[in-house]
Image (cartoon, rainbow, N blue to C red):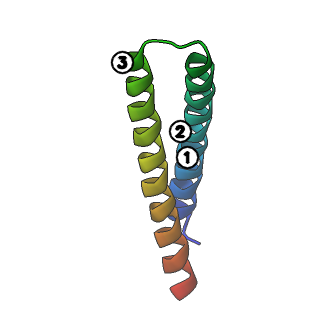
Amino acid sequence: MPLAAKNNLDELYYLTRVLDEHRVRLESERDQLKGSGSDAAHLYVIEVEITALSEEAAKLGSSISDILERDLQR
């Protein structure tokens, strides 16, 4: 595997982990707020953030898959 691809993969894996950690933290916060009957608008914003983090992590996952697939084709 070319060094540039390896470095890019490392960065993509790192970013995916960071996004997942933030998503898990927000999900926990959301669950706590749901139990306390918190402000619906605040819960809505948290849900939007969770969705955005999940979508971005999925994009990064696709990029990782593309890099790995190209490497296998070489």
Q: What SS does tag 1 mark? A: helix
27 and 72: which is toward the camera: 27
60 lies above or below 3: above
Q: Nearer the viewer, mark 2 or mark 3?
A: 3
Towards the viewer: 38 or 55: 38
- Residue 74 visible in the picture: no
Type of amino acid under label 3: Ala
Query: Within 10 Å of the Cα at label 3, are there few (<14), some (14-19), or many (20+) other Cα atoms?
Result: few
Identify the amino acid type marked 1. Thr
The three-letter code of the residue at mark 2 reads Leu
Specify the quadrant of the image occupied by residue 36. top right
**Do tag 1 and tag 2 residues touch (Cβ < 8 Å)?**
yes
Residue 6 visible in the shown view: yes
Query: Which residue is denoted by mark 2 in the rendering?
Result: 19
Residue plotted at (58% across, 31% down)? 27
Q: Residue at x 59, y 72 (%)?
A: 1
Alpha-carbon span between mark 1 and mark 2: 5 Å
- The residue that appears at 62% across and 34% down in the rendered structure is 24
Position of residue 21 in the picture relative to residue 66 (left or right): right
Q: Where is mark 3, residue-wise?
A: 41
Q: At which x and y percent is residue 7? A: 55, 54
Distance from Cα at disc 3 to Cα at disc 1: 27 Å
Tell whether label 3 touches label 2 (CB within 8 Å).
Answer: no
Residue labelled with disc 1:
16
Single out the mark in the foreground, 3 or 1: 3
Q: How many marks?
A: 3
